Amino acid sequence: MMMTNNQRIDSRLADGSAISWTMATWNWATGCTKIDPQICDSCYMFSLYPRLRKMGLPTYRWRPDEVHVHESMLQKPLEWKKPRRIFVNSMSDFFHERIPFEFLDRVLDIIRATPQHTYQVLTKRPWRMTQYGHRIGKYPENMWLGVSLGTNEMKFKIDHLRQAKARIRFLSLEPLLESLVPLDLTGIDWVIVGGMSGTHWREHEMRRDWAREIRNLCIQKGIPFFFKQSSGFKPGQGTFLDGRRWMQYPEDRLAHRSAAT
Ligand code: SF4
């Protein structure tokens, strides 16, 4: 079957990602509403969505603050034969309150049916992740669960994450807006740190020491650490910390664990 132009653009958006810690994105939901004033105010989804709508992509034909799920995108990972690390819903929030649990059940069916892939789920609504966890018990082995936060006020999200029965639990401390140390990393398998990008980066500049102290804590605890970027106008700017790139993944820790047993 011939692909239309829009289908081609859709596939390009899905297969390959500008986010450095993933390989592809799977957007079976689009649109979101702001929940964390410090992080959501600089959300890239709100600027990218209108551009995709202008291009005529069918899954972006509403307003960015309207949440829609897309049957047409559900089967996408079944088409990808080679294993990929897939970021789920870069243009929404997996656990958004407008996404019914019944639809999440169907998403998890696809995740279970594609064990060759690793699914990275990051949410700013971990209380809903907890509710969904009560419904299903254990998450699939190939699904990593993470929460985003950048301030001490939001640390309660980590407690929700710790309760999740997931093989890998991770933190995305991005944009990092203040020192978060002391930081309890019990039950955490991976930590990503990054500064703010976009027009407001100067108002919320990340101090390198804040990233350094988290990196040092990760080294001390044997937790893989990923430094995504410094603060800067362009995404992906300043990826070095103390003269090197930090691009560790949870698999590094799993390898250590199995070597030790
Ligand atoms: S939760 Fe994520 S996608 Fe939704 S508005 Fe906030 S930053 Fe954007």
Image: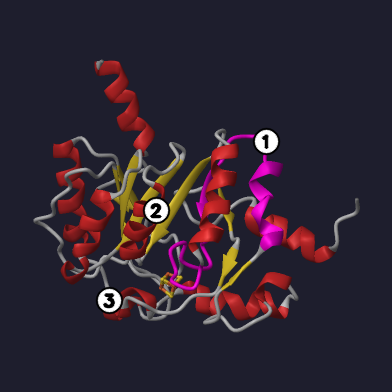
Q: Is residue 174 visible?
A: no
Q: Secondary structure at mark 2?
A: helix
CA–CA distance between discs 1 and 3?
A: 41 Å
Residue 81: numbered disc: 1
Q: Earlier in the sequence, mark 1 or mark 3?
A: 1
State the image coordinates of residue 201 (x, y, percent, origin top left).
Answer: 34, 76
Residue at point 15%, 64% (across, down): 179
Q: Which residues are magenta?
A: 71-99
Tell me if 179 is positioned left or right of 161 in this view: left
| Ligand 1 within 8 Å, label 1 CB | no
Single out the mark in the foreground, 1 or 3.
1
Residue 135: numbered disc: 2
CA–CA distance between discs 3 and 2?
A: 38 Å
Which residue type does callout 2 highlight?
Arg
Residue at point 35%, 66% (across, down): 124
Name the residue that disc number 3 marks: 204
Q: Is residue 85 magenta?
A: yes
Q: Secondary structure at mark 3?
A: helix
Q: Which picture quadrant has residue 33?
A: bottom left
Q: Secondary structure at mark 1?
A: loop
Q: Is residue 172 magenta?
A: no
Q: Earlier in the sequence, mark 3 or mark 2?
A: 2
CA–CA distance between discs 2 and 1?
A: 30 Å
Q: Tell me: residue 93, above or below residue 130.
A: below
The residue nearer to you, when weighing 183 against 29, is: 29
Q: Quadrant of ligand 1?
A: bottom left
Which residue type does callout 1 highlight?
Lys
Q: Which picture quadrant has residue 112?
A: top right
State the image coordinates of residue 170 (x, y, percent, origin top left).
Answer: 32, 49
